[in-house]
Image: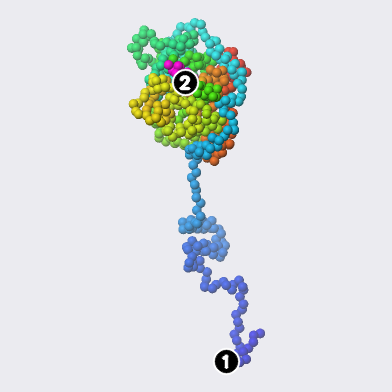
Amino acid sequence: MHPKNRVPNNGQTTPSPPTSPLRSPRHRHGRKSGRFSPFQPGRTFPHSLSWLLLYVVIRRQRVFLVVPLIYISGMLLYTGTASFDAVPVVRNRPSPGSVYRSPQVYEKLKVYMNADTSSADAISTVWKIPIEGRMETLCKQIKIWLFLLTAIDLPESNGYIYVEANGGLNQQRTSICNAVAVAGYLNATLLIPNFHFHSIWRDPSKFKDIYDEEYFISTLKNDVRVVDKIPAVIMERFDHNLTNVFNFRIKAWSSIRYYKEVVLPKLLEEKVIRISPFANRLSFDAPPAVQRLRCLANYEALRFSSPILSLGETLVARMKQRSVNSGGKYLSVHLRFEVKARERGWKGKFTKPGRVIRPGAIRINGKCPLTPLEVGLMLRGMGFGNKTYIFLASGKIYNSEKTMTPLLEMFPNLQTKEMLASEEELGPYKVWNNTEISPLRDRTFCHLFDLDCCFQRFSSRMAAIDYTVCLHSEVFVTTQGGNFPHFLMGHRRYLYGGHSKTIRPDKRRLALLFDNPNIGWRTFKRQMLNMRSHGDTKGTITKADDFAIRWDGPGIDQTGDCFVILM
């Protein structure tokens, strides 16, 4: 009950009006300025739109049926008008191997590498696994087998075969061995192969300039007839011009059966045939009799000419004399880091339309040659000290004043044929320009530093000198594939009865190691020693690889295969 006002202002007594009923607490602060409006002052359009959507969702629950559509539309509008305080940064990280980080690795490891004296020099302990007598016996039996099947009287010849050997020194060597094998198999007479003048090597040398021609003919006389010219009576049909002789265009890696079924009938008909070009025109998969002729030519009949052989043996003696502190043992490295010839002769190979070159993928896959710096790091990691004498076989090194400096820092006793031989000794093989050479750039460094004071006149003969010095080294290191290292590996194994050390680095693993600038010296050295240890078995028993030749001749132990690398 409400109280009444006993004394009103006007003197009347009237009751006060009743007060409004109390509202629920949840509605006390509901509407202060009229109805709800999402578009209020101070709000941006995206915020207002969001409030509107929220209001519709609350008031009309049926709108949930079209929520996905509303959400997508709102996000599209919001994305175009809103700004983010933190935007994620997407960094383009280079693919592994695409960045040349070896100089960074060298700078980090150099101090620790020079201070490391924890192990003996590898040149004196390179053979961890003792040579097995079985391999030596097998190689001796192979040498006997080469002369075991020699015929006493050769049957009448089916005709003459003339081949043109193209490529560099060792590709031409492959052609010669294959030509001897084909001629012997077809009972034909082989004309001394002609060397094709190539735009890259540009060497006009003939067979007798590089090899001992008389020795070649006499060594093969009981197996294959070899002559230096075809009788004039036969050449009258062709106007005494070999280019008029029928030329076989044979596919690469053709089988010996193809020669018997296709080439032999034409030989019997024409009496003279020409095969040009002849590089890689015979498959490696051939009968033992064919393999025997190949290897007889390669390891016995092909001997370098007297000037090359004499100079090569002289340089070998000088290398042994300079490395007398390590028992006359030296290491030879075949370095493939020259580019001028390939830029001149093969530049179109890498500019074909649509061709995509991925350097990182190629490097990680182990297809890139090792740089001089990487070769030095690898050898130091394998335990070869900085006093080790190294003979470097190579062409002119790319940008050598820069690229060769780290290798010379790691191995100051590095030698080349230009350093070992005198100017007069190399005179027949090099031509010197009439330019003044400073004392720091004397002629012995012209080859090493790619200067213009000299150029090679006969590249194949120079390669033959390198071949000879590498052949007699204690350890041979190959840094890239090719005919040169494959011939050397087989020849060294044959020459020394299986006792020949060859280091063939795992370039895939090396690419990953050189791509890590944070690697420590102990970790790197452990990886290199493991790689070297894995290669210790290479000089004893070597199983088949891409260039392996299987020997199944009589007198060979049949309990295991003996593999001799021909290429």
Q: Are marks 1 and 2 in contact (CB under 8 Å)?
A: no
- Quarter occupied by the N terminus: bottom right
Q: Residues within 10 Å of mark 2 (few under 14, many from 20)?
A: many
Q: Position of residue 534 (x, y in %)?
A: 59, 28
Q: Residue drawn 52% across and 30% down?
A: 386
26 up-or-down from 379: above or below? below
Q: Which is more foreground, mark 1 or mark 2? A: 2
Identity, as a three-letter code, of the amino acid under mark 1: Asn
Residue 283 in view, yes or no: no
The magenta segment: 307-317
Q: Residue drawn 62% across and 77% down?
A: 22
Q: Residue drawn 50% across and 53% down?
A: 87
Give the distance between the C-alpha atoms of the residues marked 1 and 2, in whole angstroms.
139 Å
Q: Position of residue 278 (x, y in %)?
A: 43, 19
Q: Position of residue 211 (x, y in %)?
A: 44, 16
Q: Residues within 10 Å of mark 1 (few under 14, many from 20)?
A: few
Q: Residue drawn 59% across and 13% down?
A: 555
102 up-or-down from 34: above or below? above
Does 310 lie within the magenta span?
yes
Instruction: Give the labeled residue for mark 1.
Output: 9
Could you say whether the residue bearing mark 1 is in a helix, strand or loop? loop
Identity, as a three-letter code, of the amino acid under mark 2: Leu
Q: Nearer the viewer, residue 110 or 101?
A: 110
From the image, give the main secondary structure of the stretch colored magenta: helix
Q: Say whether disc 1 or disc 2 marks the residue closer to the N-terminus.
A: 1
Instruction: Give the labeled residue for mark 2.
Output: 315
**Number of residue marks:** 2
Residue 459 in view, yes or no: yes
